[in-house]
Amino acid sequence: MKEVAVVTGGGGFIGSAVARCLLSNGISVRIIDIMESNINGVEKIKGSILDQNVVSEAVRGCDAVIHLAAMLGVRKTEIERLDCLNINIVGTVNILDACVKDGIKRIVFSSSSEIYGEPAITPIKEESEKKPKSVYALTKLISEEYLAAYHKRYGLNYSIIRFFNVYGIGQVAEFVLPRFVKAVLEDNSPVVYGNGDQVRSFCYMDDAATGVYLALIKDEANGEVFNIGNNEEISITNLARKVIEISGKDTKIQYVDMSEADRSEGRDILFRKPDISKARKLIGYSPQVCLDEGIRKLVDHGNIPDSWYEPMNYTKHGY
């Protein structure tokens, strides 16, 4: 009998990539999400991780859980702070309780590079100091502590993935790279907040999904935390230039003051680049999609949704 994995948030762009990755590796997938999923060949349960009955139904009889569901987005999580705390922390506890009750073998939890805040030393290692600058980052750090506590108390096996700037087909225009692509494809200027010197390392969705899969199947991943990303760094200004170049459009960057950004200047992080050597060594993680190739995929696909609830066609260009 095939192993069955539940993917919470499986209707999202990372969740969809994870579901496809699991299916391609012979693992049956059950998705729980408040959004519809266009992925074929999976069992779908529509509902919220805040509903304990729905969560119990979703995990019943499965072998593992990949917990991706969360409230995210800079503006949304800052405006709706209590909802963010509720969904990201209480929702995670609901998942953990259901795993313990049903005797689930393993859980992989998606955390975030946001928990590091502004790093004192780069590239960022898993043991680097945690200095969350936002409610969202705090919820991820608290959830990590819950996983460690449930492992100690109940013996629940777990792995934690800290994603670094994942992007890809299906990601909404609220995030910087798809926002740039959408603007340029519509013959508008990509808007850069501040001077554009902020440095990021962008990880394509399929590489992120592979990292999750490896953390799920490798015994060496049990009880471990992994940075999952790409160590190819780029400034935001150069990212905008690269999008313009790859798209073949004739447009200019528009610089605006940080006061107009979704992320306030005090919450901005200037340098974010992961050290992925631990993931390479323990689980064999190695990102395959370079930034130029990933941007080309977005440009060729062309459909950048404005919101998470806008229907998304993943069948175009192989999705």
Image (cartoon, helix red, strand yellow):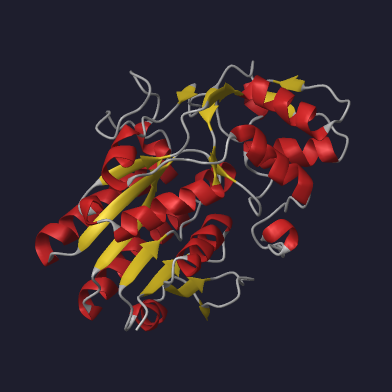
Left or right placement of residue 220 versus residue 79 in this view? left
- Examine the rendering and report whether any part of residue 91 can be seen: no
Q: Position of residue 71 (x, y in %)?
A: 49, 55
Residue 35, horizontal then vertical, whole percent: 59, 69
Q: Residue placed at 28% from the left, 75% from the top?
A: 98
Residue shown at 74%/60% (left/top)?
Answer: 316
Q: Is residue 69 visible?
A: yes
Which residue occupies the foreground of this view, 294 or 38? 294
14, 245: nearer the viewer: 245
285 on left or right of 72: left
Query: In the figure, 280 relative to 69: above or below?
Result: above
Q: Is residue 176 left or right of residue 47?
A: right
Q: Quadrant of residue 22?
A: bottom left
The N terminus: image quadrant: bottom left
Q: Give residue 192's quadrant in the image.
A: top right
Q: Number of labelled discs?
A: 0
From this view, report whether residue 81 is shown above or below residue 183: below
Residue at x 66% of width, y 20% of height = 237
Q: Is residue 206 left or right of residue 273?
A: right
What residue is at 30 percent from the left and 74 percent from the top? Answer: 63
Q: Please state, as top left, top right, bottom left or bottom right, where the C terminus lies in the image.
A: bottom right
Residue 234, x across and y down, in percent: 57, 23
80 shown above or below 56: above
* Foreground pick, 187 / 75: 187
Q: Quadrant of residue 265?
A: top right
